[in-house]
Amino acid sequence: MKNTLISLSILFSALTVTSVQAANPATGCAAKKQDIQQELAMAREHGNAARIAGLEKALRETKANCTDSGLLTARQQKVAEKQLKVQEREQDLREAQAKGRGDKIEKQQRKLADARDELKEAQDALTQ
């Protein structure tokens, strides 16, 4: 019975957090804190002690050290790194195409697609 009440309490808390987020989407450090808190609730629900400890530490560090400007700078830097990676993969693909080896071309196309996906994720993070 006690476990059922705890589970329902956690579920209700998660639903409340989700509805609040939908009504008032957070950005920057506030969004980062919310993400950690959501993961923490899930870890508690599943009784994952190691994950709980790691997330509690991450939450403390985020509360102590996170600034919106610092977070934005880090995310912009990540986007720049991912753009460079895409450029490198495009160059690798051009070289493979120049050599005319189909197996190498396919491999470089996959790597380029992965690099573009990572770039999109980094760009999406800029708006969070």
Image (spheres, rainbow, N blue to C red):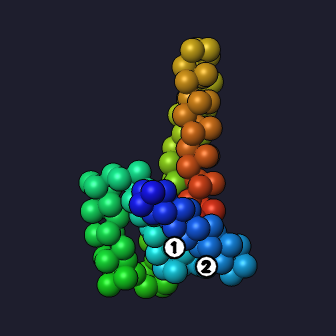
Q: Nearer the viewer, residue 58 or 96?
A: 58
Residue 30 makes an appearance in the image:
yes
Estimate the x, y position of residue 84 in percent, counting from the top left.
51, 53
Compared to residue 45, the image places residue 114 above or below, namely above
Q: How far apart are the two marked residues, 2 and 1, measured between alpha carbons?
A: 8 Å
Residue 114 percent across, percent down from the top left:
57, 39
Instruction: Give the residue pinned by disc 2.
Output: 26
Label 2 close to label 1 by CB (< 8 Å): yes
Q: How many numbered marks are there?
A: 2
Q: Residue at x 44, y 67 (%)?
A: 36
Q: Which one is in front in this view, the residue at disc 2 or the one at disc 1?
A: 1
Secondary element at image label 1: helix
Packing grade of label 1 (10 A; few <14, some 14-19, many >=20) is some
The image quadrant that residue 74 belongs to is bottom left
Near mark 2 (Cα within 10 A), the count class, few <14, some 14-19 or many ≥20, is: some
Q: Earlier in the sequence, mark 2 or mark 1?
A: 2
Task: Say left or right for 53 vs 25.
Answer: left
- The amino acid type of the residue labelled 1 equals Gln
Residue tagged 1:
34
- Residue farthest to the front, as pictured: 1
Locate residue 81, reporting x and y percent: 47, 58
- Residue type at tag 2: Ala
Residue nearer the viewer, 62 or 16: 16
Residue at 55% x, 70% y: name it.
13
